Image: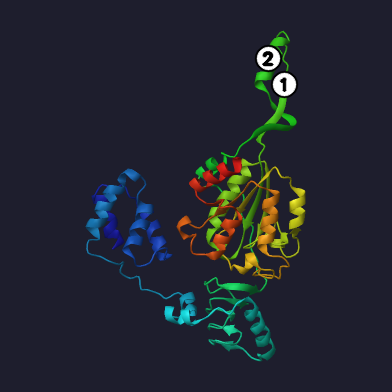
């Protein structure tokens, strides 16, 4: 089939080569696409067409050859192994989900202590005990609108208000080659240039003037390098639902590194509490007290938070509400302290702005920040930089 397709393209005066045909065969053998003809079209065009000006000619030739064909022959559908694992979990209808009631913070933990004392064996698929793939608020792999996840990976519902496990997050890459240059352009709106430090840069104008004054004898003049003098504190939410936005956050982090000489960054998870960290690989052992951050960096810093603000409202409003540990003071208390220290502050949210009304926690964060929450888009970044410049 592919040989005939190749000859058909040659007949339509498309400059395709045997080497490109072999590359297409290797891609199909590696199953880079499935049986979908649309996927095959994109793959074959990417490999066989070297000039965008030939796209239209390729489209016409492709349509002629595959007219009436809906799927590639010989590509039998295979069910991925992870799909089979998911099939073992209980799938609830919307009606069944509505029957499951939230217990409330105190009652949830009171019942949890009782289950720990009473349970003697493993359970799966149930609605009461600590287990897997059920509707109990305790365990993992199932569904409950408000519970405690214990061990195992998330089922993807993101409704747990506590996670009983040691989770590892990776650092964001600050050397990412930016695919969206306008992120850097937007950040440049927050610029206050100054020359500080050692004189290491040649001052060409000063050298010319000095040489002229010196009757032609060379008089080299040096000056400090010109830098953006704006100081920025960057707090990055990491892990959990933020895994969906790693690429966008890495692009922002990399751009900020190149634009701001005075940039300090810290990580947190969901909400800031009594400690933050700079290295996710050592976050359990090398935390910096938030009080130390507040007392170290002056009020001339701009404060930038990056996170989807999607969490249990308890994590913001209640002592002990953190999903990972027992916090003595509410997250809102720590956010208010930081906002009192650094009044020029914004929150950047990678979620599309039209989705912001669905999470109560997101509304709470917006209120704390005086509605200075902006989407992580070029337009949102420009608005955020203007707010920080005031």
The answer to whether 164 is drawn above or below residue 15 in the figure is below
Q: What residue is at 41 percent from the left and 65 percent from the top? A: 29
Mark 1 and mark 2 in contact? Answer it, CB < 8 Å.
Answer: yes
The answer to whether 112 is drawn above or below residue 282 in the figure is below
The coloring applied to the image is: rainbow
Nearest to the observer: residue 251 or residue 359: 359
Q: What residue is at 65 percent from the left and 78 percent from the top? A: 106
Q: Check disc 1: other Cα within 10 Å, few if <14, some if 14-19, many if 20+.
A: some
> Is residue 87 among what the camera can see?
no
> Where does the image place residue 371, in percent across and percent down from the top left?
55, 52
> Where does the image place residue 178, in percent across and percent down from the top left?
53, 47
Distance Cα–Cα, label 1 vs label 2: 9 Å
**Among numbered discs 1 and 2, the one appearing first in the sequence:** 2
Residue beneath disc 2: 209
Residue beneath disc 1: 221
Q: What residue is at 66 percent from the left and 47 percent from the top? A: 343
> Where does the image place residue 87, in percent across and percent down from the top left?
46, 80
Q: Secondary structure at mark 2?
A: helix
Q: Secondary structure at mark 1?
A: loop
- Name of the residue lying farthest toward the top: 215
């Amino acid at each position: 089939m592919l040989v005939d397709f190749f000859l058909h393209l040659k007949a339509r005066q498309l400059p395709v080569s045997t080497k490109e045909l072999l590359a297409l065969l290797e891609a199909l053998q590696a199953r880079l696409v499935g049986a979908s003809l649309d996927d095959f079209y994109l793959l074959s065009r990417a490999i066989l067409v070297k000039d965008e000006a030939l796209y239209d000619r390729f489209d016409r030739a492709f349509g002629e050859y595959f007219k009436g064909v809906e799927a590639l022959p010989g590509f039998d559908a295979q069910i991925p192994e992870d799909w089979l694992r998911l099939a073992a979990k209980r799938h609830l209808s919307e009606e069944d989900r509505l029957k499951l009631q939230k217990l409330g913070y105190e009652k949830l933990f009171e019942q949890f202590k009782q289950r720990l004392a009473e349970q003697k064996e493993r359970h799966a698929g149930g609605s009461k005990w600590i287990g897997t793939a059920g509707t109990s608020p305790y365990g993992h792999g199932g569904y409950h609108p408000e519970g405690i996840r214990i061990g195992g990976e998330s089922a993807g519902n993101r409704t747990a208000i506590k996670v009983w496990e040691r989770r590892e997050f990776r650092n964001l890459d600050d050397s990412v080659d930016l695919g969206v240059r306008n992120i850097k352009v937007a950040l440049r709106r927050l610029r206050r240039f100054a020359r500080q430090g050692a004189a290491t840069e040649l001052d060409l104008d000063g050298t010319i003037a000095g040489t002229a004054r010196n009757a032609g004898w060379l008089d080299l003049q040096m000056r400090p390098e010109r830098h953006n003098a704006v100081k920025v504190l960057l707090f990055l939410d990491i892990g959990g639902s933020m895994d969906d936005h790693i690429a966008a956050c890495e692009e922002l982090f990399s751009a900020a590194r190149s634009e701001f000489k005075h940039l300090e960054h810290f990580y947190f998870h969901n909400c800031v509490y009594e400690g933050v960290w700079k290295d996710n690989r050592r976050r359990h052992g090398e935390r910096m007290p938030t009080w130390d951050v507040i007392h170290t960096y002056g009020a001339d810093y701009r404060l930038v938070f990056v996170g989807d603000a999607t969490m249990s409202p308890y994590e913001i409003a209640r002592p002990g509400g953190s999903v990972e540990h027992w916090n003595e003071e509410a997250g809102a208390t720590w956010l208010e302290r930081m906002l009192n220290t650094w009044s020029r502050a914004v929150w950047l949210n990678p979620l599309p702005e039209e989705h912001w009304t669905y999470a109560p926690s997101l509304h709470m964060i917006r209120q704390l920040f005086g509605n200075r929450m902006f989407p992580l888009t070029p337009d949102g970044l420009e608005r955020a930089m203007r707010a920080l410049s005031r």
